[in-house]
Image (cartoon, rainbow, N blue to C red):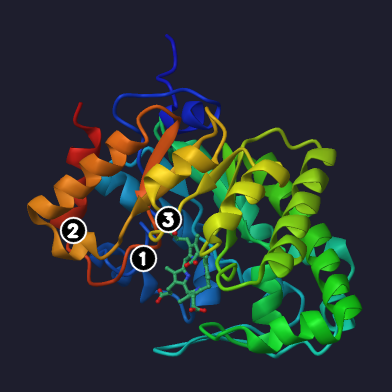
Amino acid sequence: MAQPEKKLLNTLNGKIYEAPPVWMMRQAGRHLPEYLELRARAKDFLDFCYSPSLATEATLQPIRRYNMDGAILFADILLILDAMGRNVRFVKGEGPQLDPASNAADLDKFPLEKLLDRMSPVYETVSRVKTQLPPETTLIGFAGAPWTVAVYAVEGKGGTDKSVSRLKAYQEPEDLDAMLDILVETTAHYLKAQADAGADALMIFDSWAEGLAEDSMLRLVIKPTQKLIQRVRELGVTQPIIGFPRGSGAMLAPYAKETGVTAVGLDTALPVKWVNEALPTGFPVQGNLDPLRLIAGGDEMDNRIREIKSALKDRPHIFNLGHGVTPQTPIKNVERAVRVIREI
Ligand code: 1CP
């Protein structure tokens, strides 16, 4: 019997559907009661990510509930820094904290094989999820982009204005570039391991691309991502890659053209009509409903979904949010959104 088609994967490969495939960033996590119940079983968040049975279950929960077209591996972009010895902690209510890296040598304490081996529970999760997913669901592996991970490494925490790392880029350019190079090489192998374990597609989160000057965007976001993708391809990975430089604004256009990504994620602030003018015909995009629309719900949510679908109907489009699902999101609004996204 023929396998049912993977719509999300086909969209990444250029196919256009009348009703776009859908998944949502942070679709697993705190808005789901079944996640909170599961989460209570692990000592801390890192243990949770490193437990293939818990992480597999968390990956599958939103698929069971919403039948999304895409499943995203349950893990975190900071695992790689923990493997590098930066002692990542998730403090309740405060977000992640880690031992800041003062120079590139701080990210280069262990041989590559050892780092990759430390993250092996993640590849185990990928292969377990793969065997349990419906055949029409696309499995997405991911990593943080070199710049975003470097920001966490330098600042020692998230949610900052990145001024320490942006200043370091100007004042100690060689050391910052060396950090980015280390992250490019490690991340390339990490993504390759996820691809080998069965990921159908890969995504690179550049969550701190926002607010960079044009020259910094080229140097810190576009160039390292280009190197990363080149390296991933050299390692033999053929899966499509979605790049998400959140907050890149107009620099999304050179990002899409120069990095080698297969598709780009659109953040909430990007005007969808501008996207059509700025990106080449046929270039796949993913996005970009405001996650807060899912809290408010109602006809306004439905109308905005229809507007986004309509504006992007002539190019391959994966419906998603412009940022992650928030913990306050009512499940019934996610169900309703998925129904509207799938209506023809
Ligand atoms: O249970 C909990 O309270 C932990 C909350 C949580 C979750 C559910 C964190 C901590 N990470 C995750 C999972 C996660 N993180 C996934 C897989 C689940 C899914 O998407 O369904 C993914 C893809 C990520 C990626 C991630 N982690 C990003 C990139 C996306 C984005 O939000 O921009 C970033 C920046 C992180 C760091 C991180 N991890 C967790 C938090 C709260 C944060 C952000 C904190 C900050 O502001 O710096």
Q: Measured from the top left, where is residue 168 in percent x and y?
A: 78, 85
In the displayed image of the protein, which residue is found farthest to the top? 1
**Viewer-nearest of discs 2 and 3:** 3
**Viewer-nearest of discs 3 and 1:** 3
Which secondary structure lies at badge 1? Answer: loop
- Local crowd at mark 3 within 10 Å, few (<14), some, or many (≥20)? some
Which secondary structure lies at badge 3? Answer: loop
Camera-side residue of 106 and 148:
148
Cβ of mark 1 under 8 Å from ligand 1: the answer is yes
**Label 2 sits on residue:** 331
Cβ of mark 3 under 8 Å from ligand 1: the answer is no
279, above or below 212, in the image: above
Q: Measured from the top left, where is residue 65 in percent x and y?
A: 25, 48
Which secondary structure lies at badge 2? Answer: helix
Identify which amino acid the numbered label 2 is placed on.
Ile
Which one is earlier in the sequence, the residue at label 3 or at label 1? Answer: 1
Identify which amino acid the numbered label 1 is placed on.
Gly
**Label 3 sits on residue:** 270
Structural distance between the alpha carbons of marks 1 and 2: 12 Å
The answer to whether marks 3 and 1 mark residues whose Cβ atoms lie closer than 8 Å is no
Q: Can residue 128 be seen at all in this image of the molecule? A: no
- Local crowd at mark 1 within 10 Å, few (<14), some, or many (≥20)? many
Structural distance between the alpha carbons of marks 2 and 3: 26 Å
Q: Which numbered marker is on residue 29? A: 1
**Which residue corresponds to the image point at 55% horizontal and 70% vertical from the top-left?**
210
Q: Measured from the top left, where is residue 160 in percent x and y?
A: 54, 86
12, above or below 338, in the image: above
The answer to whether marks 1 and 2 mark residues whose Cβ atoms lie closer than 8 Å is no
User: Quadrant of the rendered structure where residue 215 is?
Assistant: bottom right
User: Quadrant of the rendered structure where residue 312 is?
Assistant: top left
